Image (cartoon, rainbow, N blue to C red):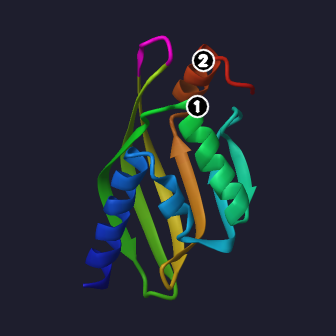
Amino acid sequence: MYRFIVSRILRRNFARLSRGDYDSVVRQFAEDSVLEMAGDHALGGERRGRAAVGDWFRETWATFPGLQLLPRDVVVAGPPWRTRVATRFDVRATLPDGTDYRNEGMQYLRLRWGRVLEDCLYEDTQRLAEALERIGAPA
């Protein structure tokens, strides 16, 4: 039952993010959380602390207005004090020049009592870097 609830919350959070409501998701991060996105590009690297995580979400949604994150598969393991979640997801957005951006990715989360401790994102970095270059995002 616990795994089902966590999976449902995660899917609900993806829907919130797709509506641009990242603030409610950021509130679920622990004060000392870490968000890491793979790749050498404007959105890549490590952010430490809830404030820095919030900045990353704001920057991401400013860069890709209307960003849609669609979970395909969610796997939950572990007890409430040491939960691990893996999610395969699709990414969709329209770039400022009107072209479609499509990508796919994986997320690995570590949770403790419902708080996000670590969020690791692995998107097709080449495709993402090309989209960021196309819209002129700094490297």
Mark 2 = which residue?
A: 135
User: What residue appears at the point 51 percent right and 65 percent down from the top-left corner?
Assistant: 109
On the image, the x and y values in percent for residue 132 come to: 61, 24
Q: Quadrant of the N terminus?
A: bottom left
Residue 137 as seen in the image, left or right of residue 27: right
Q: Main secondary structure of the magenta part?
A: loop
From the viewer's side, name the closer residue of 108 and 56: 56
Can you say whether 35 is above or below 43 in the image?
below
The amino acid type found where label 2 is placed reads Ile
Disc 2 to disc 1: CB gap under 8 Å: yes
Tally of numbered tags? 2
**Pointer 2 or 1: first along the chain:** 1
Visible in this render: residue 40? yes
Q: Is residue 54 above or below residue 138?
A: below
**Horizontal and vertical percent for residue 8?**
29, 68
Residue shown at the point (42%, 62%) measured from the top left: 86
Quadrant of the rendered image containing residue 77: bottom left
Q: Is residue 38 visible?
A: no
The residue to which callout 1 is attached is 63
Q: CA distance from mark 2 to mark 1?
A: 8 Å
User: Who is closer to the viewer here, 43 or 125?
Assistant: 43
* Residues drawn in magenta: 96-100
Residue positioned 72% across, 65% down in the render: 49
Q: Is residue 5 left or right of residue 119?
A: left
